[in-house]
Amino acid sequence: MSLPRIAIVGRPNVGKSSLLNMLAKAKVSIVDPTPGVTRDRVSHVIDLEGPLKTEPHKLVEIVDTGGYGVYTAEGARFDDAGADLQTLTADIEGQIGAAVATADLILFVVDAQAGITTLDETIAKMLRERRLVKDAEGKQRELPVQMVANKVDANNWEPHGLEASALGFGEPWLVSALNNYMRREFKEKLFHALPEPDPMGEDEPEMKIALVGRRNAGKSSFVNALAGENRVIVSEIAGTTRDAVDVRFEMDGRTMVAIDTAGVRKRSKFADAVEQFANMRMAQSVVRADVVLLLIDATEKISAIDKRLGAQIAESYKPCVIVVSKWDLAEGKKNRKGEPLSPDDYQEYIEKELPGLDTAPIIFTSSKEKIGIEQVIEVAFELFDQSRQRISTGKINKTLKEILAVRGPSSRLGTQAKILYATQVAVAPPTFVVVVNKPELFKGDYERYLRNRLRETTPFTEVPVRLFFRERKRADIEDLLSGRHKRKQEARRREAGEAGPGGGKFSVDGIDDELIRQIMAEDDED
């Protein structure tokens, strides 16, 4: 059973995105008075609480849609490059239609302060004419439409909000999404309007993948190829995607979410605050993703923007797949030697231009020809699984000892570098704390060398590894002890009548080597 779905529809600037953000308790959708900010279907899964604490929560997917008639009803028809945004009207309205057809509840939002407009009446007429739609099984069902009068900022606006009942969908729910007036009543009504939760629950997505790249790199086409439908708008107009759009889909029995983000360009060329917000959403999407897909347009040279994105991904320590898009348009072109361009040529070019992503797999794709799409997801899952691997403390210490024996860090002062103890403290990314005698000896070139050798000798062959070097101190040794080991050591101290830390009888410097050997032995037994 899929999650109940709510579609929010209405004309531009009635507060649809603000309503989604209020319900999600987060800034999911960009809010700006500029018409046409939302273009795609922006969806978000929320945990809706009942009015009583004893009632089970309801998971529901809420879909924010673009404003109907945005580029014909109001200004801002042309973007900063002079492109006619009215050409997007059919695509935006198509996305609205798709959201309505698959919704379990439609929230038709109007602006209580502006009153009922001609465009509101047009939307109401369309919804009445489409009261019957076909579901996934081809059966007809009635569209459940609920009027919502937004921007009811105080009780003096309530009579104005109730005027929306004239549109023929019953008494409207009153709310102010921005200042939370009547928020509790609104959420209670919404809770009771939804079906009871499925006792089996909805599977959480196993993996989130964020698609990033410069403008017109083919991100939206890639998402649509994955979803098998026109889930997001694809247009030759650069910057069509504004929000970070989550698209949930399933492949080979594994559930995932693809996050389509806004295309990036130089900050100096940002047209408005909306583009700045879109760029921030892109950065946030990288943070919340498990794997990042960096799309490189094969028909264009790798630019400073591509390099900046590559550096951002590397700094985030996220597993990355470099997806070469539009390969069908580039394959066969001439390389520098005048020979047909091959994947090997382009791979060498990418490795030279994006050195910070030297371990990232490179896959050549064509969304139009459906080439390489499934392979990208397969590789993404491999990286996802890699980044969650753990290796025992004994194994990592043995591995580091062997690496150090082959080549240790050099020191002008002749100080011998020693690795005293290492342990994996986290996954995604694999993170290791390495206790050494002189941390400064391990920084820089040797740290890069150590990471490369770890990739060759551990399961982390294609994912970033994070290393923290610490000098041996009493606090560090205690921090490295897991709860189990720490409790065992405390029990041993109590049995021996020792005072423990701060009591004068227990010296970390005196027993840390023994303790480390015990922990390593226990980990090897596990």
Image (cartoon, rainbow, N blue to C red):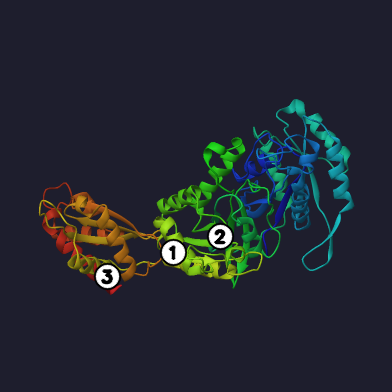
Quarter of the rendering containing residue 427: bottom left
CA distance separating discs 1 and 2: 13 Å
Name the residue: 28% across, 61% down.
449
CA distance separating discs 3 and 2: 42 Å
Q: Is residue 217 above or below residue 243?
A: below
Q: Secondary structure at mark 3?
A: helix
Name the residue: 40% across, 58% down.
429
Q: Which residue is mark 3?
A: 395
Q: Secondary structure at mark 1?
A: helix
Check whether the beta carbons of the residues at disc 3 and disc 2 lie within 8 A of each other.
no
- Residue kind at label 2, given as amino acid type: Ala
Judge whether residue 428 can be spotted in this image: no
Name the residue: 62% across, 41% down.
30
Viewer-nearest of labels 1 and 3? 1
N-terminal of the pair, mark 3 or mark 2, is: 2
Quarter of the rendering containing residue 360: bottom left
Q: Which residue is mark 2?
A: 298
Q: Which residue is mark 1?
A: 348
